[in-house]
Image (tube, rainbow, N blue to C red):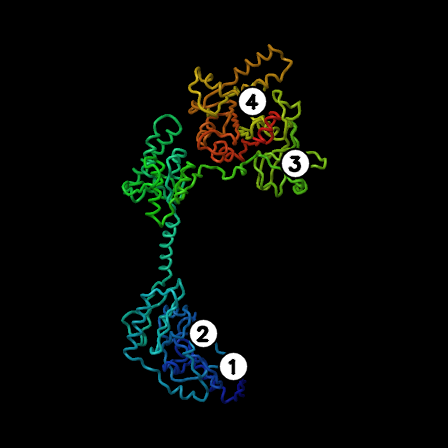
Amino acid sequence: MPLPTPPSKLGALLSPDEYPTQLRARRSTRKTRGGVPEAAAVEDASAGVSLTLPLPTAAAERTGLEVPAVAPDIAPPQPRRARRGQRADSDAVTASASLPYDATAASDVSRVDEAVEVPETTAYPPALDSSHTASHTANDAAGHAATAPARESREGREARRANARATARARPATPLPQTPPTQQTTSAHDREAPLGTETPITARGADLDAPGVDTPLLLTDTAPKGRRRGQDAAPRAEQATRKLFVLDTNVLLHDPSSLFRFEEHDVYLPMMTLEELDNNKKGMSEVARNARQVSRSLDALVAADGGNMADGIALSCLGNRDARGKLFFQTSLNDIEAVVGLPEGKADNQILGVVRSLQRARPDRSVALVSKDINMRIKAHALGLRAEDYRNDQVLEDNDLLYTGVMPLPRDFWHRHAKGMESWKDARTGSTFYRLSGPQVGAMLVNQFVYLEPNDGEPSFHGVVREINGRTAVLQTLRDYGHNRNNVWGVTARNREQNFAMNLLMDPEIDFVTLIGQAGTGKTLLALAAGLAQVLDEKRYNEIIVTRATVPVGEDIGFLPGTEEEKMQPWMGAFDDNLEVLQKSDDSAGDWGRAATQDLIRSRLKVKSMNFMRGRTFVEKYVIIDEAQNLTPKQMKTLVTRAGPGTKLICLGNLAQIDTPYLTEGSSGLTYVVDRFKGWRHGGNVMLARGERSRLADHATEVL
């Protein structure tokens, strides 16, 4: 019985006698080298070169398609193992299979004697060169089969080997040029591989045309070298962006650690800066102490580096990891050109000359003068020099961003946070607690006061944030110190902010309180009244200690006679005025009662000088620091760290009345502690807004 004819295999019906013949021809085609079908030698019309064309099946003889010429050894990637008769090494085949196909990478390794044509459904590799395309029809198949492969001359082989060596040494950024038309064949290894791959290069000295010489040398592609070039370019780009800051003497005297505050940028110290440091190191003032500290830091840097000072000293050699730049000293004193028109003997003018010389000598660097002297910065700008203020000591760039300790609630607060809300009441204090969650919780801080005062007649809400746990907050209602029955030493709160401040001052769980406000807002009166109530009535603290920065508003009147308290008495006039107000609050006591109360207050109220605070420890004391805006961050740290167990510290100040030189609202010690202590569960801050001294004082504050 004749075998059935499968039309899906042959594409046309065959007779039973022709079917075995075609089947044997197809099986013999599959036994060719490397699993590649039979190939035909095709002649390139443009270059006159004979190329070997792989053609898959013999069934394509019935079609008349034009087939592009492809090197028989450059087949699509074959993941299967090499078949019998394949000469190339398995590693080389795997590497070459990962490369993109190119018409110029033709090889004549495989030779076949029979030429067939490819049917229409045969798939070919992309990116074929049109110059290597030949037309094949069924009529000239016999002519193609008779054409013998072209043999390459000795000059052609030498040219191919030279081309392979040049390709191995070169690192092209663009695709390699194609082989000239005069060259008969091009090695498949000469093609450019993608970045990050390993390109096989034929061994030097081997005959590329000889059969069996297919062992590649795996050479790393140009990608790592390109990355090394990028890594080398990164330090150069960083060097171009790194600035060179020339420091004025007042910067070092203002902040002794300013040498290490410039991160990756370099610091330059003129010789005149060192000279001024030497002139200011004598004495016991804050400026003298800072000058000595800077001198010790410079000495430690020079000793730790031990190299050539002209090359710069690494600022990180003392353990300051944030300082990644270098420190340069002025090592040449003769090539500095003085600024024409300015006195040469003045230190500021000499520093300006150094800055201008550096700017001319180093046009590749951004040279800038850093000074706290406003006039010196103006002169630098007039001379075309870049000058900046030292801003690293400023806690806030904008004083409006200072933490106020008070946050108003939106009108729909209870509607948006009512889901899952819990409430309970403390029988001991009479306060009501609310546990809630919602979008407003993310903006709250611990011990921050919140209030809601609707205009539709509903009761107002004043509370404080006691606890924050993720998206859940606990609010507590406040005690109303504005009511007469809740007065503190005869003093009641006159506005909302004073009530907030009184809740902080009377809370035993709060250890650190800062009150900020303009003149006449009641800062000193509230703090003193709360201190007297907790020292004399509740016996919570032993005594009240009052201190302040002794910075005169005008000229100094000279030395004061007497003891420490007598010397501080002129500075404590504000407390004496408030004590008179507090003593007159009880009219029923009479003259004898007020005199006894005054003696009792004087026995529990001590006035101390800040100059003798170092080394002390206050245990169960109520400490008031008045005029705290005139303190530097270092002085504020010295005072706050004096607090011992059971001590409460209150800082009072007005940022609009800073009398200390070189201090601003952003660099004041009061601003420093407000920003650092916000959100602490044992600290709080209130910014008093409305003045309550008198109508004259309120009007003067607004118009003057």
Give coordinates of residue 594: x percent, y percent: 59, 13
Give the residue pinned by disc 1. 9
Mark 1 or 3, which is nearer the eye? 3
Q: CA distance from mark 1 to mark 4?
A: 106 Å
Give coordinates of residue 345: x percent, y percent: 32, 35
> From the image, which quarter does the N terminus lie in?
bottom right
> For mark 1, does the 10 Å Cα neighbourhood hold few (<14), some (14 to 19), or many (20 or more) residues?
few
- Closer-to-camera residue (443/143): 443
> For mark 2, does the 10 Å Cα neighbourhood hold few (<14), some (14 to 19), or many (20 or more) residues?
some
> For mark 4, does the 10 Å Cα neighbourhood hold few (<14), some (14 to 19), or many (20 or more) residues?
many
Question: Which amino acid, by three-letter code, is at mark 2?
Answer: Pro
Mark 2 or 3, which is nearer the eye? 3
Q: Residue furthest right?
A: 457
Mark 4 or 2, which is nearer the eye? 4
> For mark 3, does the 10 Å Cα neighbourhood hold few (<14), some (14 to 19), or many (20 or more) residues?
some
| Residue 279 vertical placement versus 90 (above, below) | above
| Residue 134 vertical placement versus 168 (above, below) | below
Q: Which mark, residue 125?
A: 2
Q: CA distance from mark 1 to mark 3?
A: 86 Å
Mark 1 or 2, which is nearer the eye? 2
Q: Residue furthest front?
A: 341
Badge 4 or badge 2: first in the primary sequence? 2
Badge 1 or badge 3: first in the primary sequence? 1
Q: CA distance from mark 2 to mark 3?
A: 75 Å
Q: Which mark, residue 452?
A: 3
Question: Which amino acid, by three-letter code, is at mark 3?
Answer: Leu
